[in-house]
Image: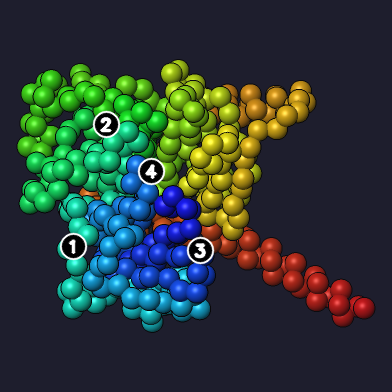
Amino acid sequence: MNESKETIVSGGNDADLRVYDVAKEKCCTVIEHHSRKVLCIKDNVLMPQTFMSCSADGTVRLFDLRCHYGNTRKETLQQANSVTNAGVSDTDSFETGVLPQSLGGGRADRRSGASTVPKESLVQSLPSSVYTVDWHPMNSHDYIVSCDDGNVYLFDLRKTGMNDYKKAYRNIFLNVDNRCDVTGASFDCYGRKIITTCIRGSIYMYDTERNFEQEYGLNYHENNVNNENEIQTFEREFKGHQSFETIKGVWFWGSESEYVISGSDEGTIFIWERETAKIVRILEGHQGNVNNLAFHPTAPAFASSGIDSHVNVWEPKDEEITEQQEERRQNLIKEAEEREFRAPEMDFAGGGEMFMLQLIMMMNRRRAPTSSDDDEEQENNSMEDEEDEED
C-alpha cells in the first residue's frame, strides 16, 4: 500500500496487525488493537497512507501510517517469522496464548479484559464478526462491511462516533437470508453497485443508490417487515458456484466492472457476466476450496489462493484453444448451471463462531481416512514389506 508501494500490512489469528517497511527490511511495527483474529485489511487509494482493518471482535478500525498509536511495538523480522504459524493448531494456540480460529482467535488476555484494547483507532463496533471491509472507490468517507449476522452495512466515516451503530449506517437492501454469514462484499468501480456472497447461498448484486427501508417504510431492526417475500431488493443473482465450506470473497472485475468473479468449493474460479448473470468461464487449477483473489491494478491478471499450498496467477493467452478444450469449458458451465444447491445440515442458531466450528468439524471428517482407506493402506504396506523380505 501507499504511493511508493513500500509498505505491506498483514493480520492474522493472533489479532495483531503487522506493518512492514519493504525498503528497510529489518523490522516491522506490531499494532495490538484487535482482541480477536483479523479477517480483512483494505487500503484506501484516495488516501494512500491509510487503511482499515476488521476482525472477529466486531470492530472496524482506521489507521494512518503517518500517525503514532498506543499499544504498538517494534519487532524484528526474525521475531515476526517465529510467530507466523502461531495458532495453526489448538495445542500451538494455547501454548502461545493465541486461541484457536474456531473460537475467534485472538489473545486470551485481550479477550478476558486483562489487557486494554485502545479506542483511538476505532471507527465502528458491531455485535457480530466482521469478515470484510471495502472502501468506496469515488470518495474517502463511505465504506461497506460484511458480517456473520447476515448483513452488509454501508457506513459513512463522517458519522463515526455514534454510540448506536444502527444510526450510523444506511440500509440498502432487505437480507435474502439473514441466517447466512455474508463473507464478502465489494463495490464496483464507481461505487454504484455492491456484490455480496454468503456461506450456503448465492451471490447478489445491489444498487447503493436505493434505500428500500425508506421506499417501503421498513424497519429491519424491529423485525416488522411486511410482505418481505414480495420485495426483491437485490438487482441480480449469480448462481452455479459452491460456497458451503470456507470463507470466500467476491469482486467485480474488468475496467468497467463488467464481470463478477469468485472462488468455489470444488477448486474452481467462476466468472459471470455482470449484466446477464451468465457464467462465461470456470477456471480450474486448485486442489481445494478457492477463497481469495487479488487483482493487478492495470493488467487483466489476478492471483488466487485457497486451502491448498500454492498461489495461482492467471492472465489471458494469445493462442487458440483446441476443440477438446472448448468442449471441456462448455461442459463445466453446463454442469454448474444445472446442478442444485445442497447445503450441509447445520444449526445456525449458535451464531457465526458456532457455524464456523461446525464447518471445520465437517471438513475434518471429510479429510479423515475411512476404515477402508486404513485397510487398503495396511494391505499396501504389508505387500511392500513382503517384497523387501524377498529381495
Name which residue lies at 11% across and 24% down: 214
Q: CA distance from mark 3 to mark 1?
A: 26 Å
Q: Secondary structure at mark 2?
A: loop
Q: Is tag 1's residue or tag 2's residue first in the polypeptide sequence?
A: 1
Q: Which residue is mark 4?
A: 45
Q: Which residue is mark 3?
A: 22
Name which residue lies at 50% across and 78% down: 78
Is 230 displayed left or right of 44 in the figure? left
Q: Secondary structure at mark 4?
A: loop
Name which residue lies at 70% across and 32% down: 317
141 or 152: nearer the eye? 141
Q: Amino acid at mark 2?
A: Val
Q: Secondary structure at mark 3?
A: loop
CB under 8 Å between callouts 4 and 2?
A: no
Q: CA distance from mark 4 to mark 2?
A: 31 Å
Q: CA distance from mark 1 to mark 2?
A: 35 Å
Q: Amino acid at mark 1?
A: Glu
Q: Splitting the image into 4 quarters, where does residue 53 fall?
A: bottom left
Mark 3 residue crowding within 10 angstroms, few (<14) / some (14–19) / many (20+):
few
Q: CA distance from mark 2 to mark 3?
A: 43 Å
Q: Which residue is mark 1?
A: 120
CB under 8 Å between callouts 4 and 3?
A: no
The answer to whether residue 265 of the structure is visible from this angle is no
Q: Nearer the viewer, mark 4 or mark 1?
A: 4
Mark 4 residue crowding within 10 angstroms, few (<14) / some (14–19) / many (20+):
some
Q: Is tag 3's residue or tag 1's residue first in the polypeptide sequence?
A: 3
Q: Position of residue 388 (x, y in %)?
A: 86, 77
Mark 2 residue crowding within 10 angstroms, few (<14) / some (14–19) / many (20+):
some
121 or 259: nearer the eye? 121
What's the mark number on residue 176? 2
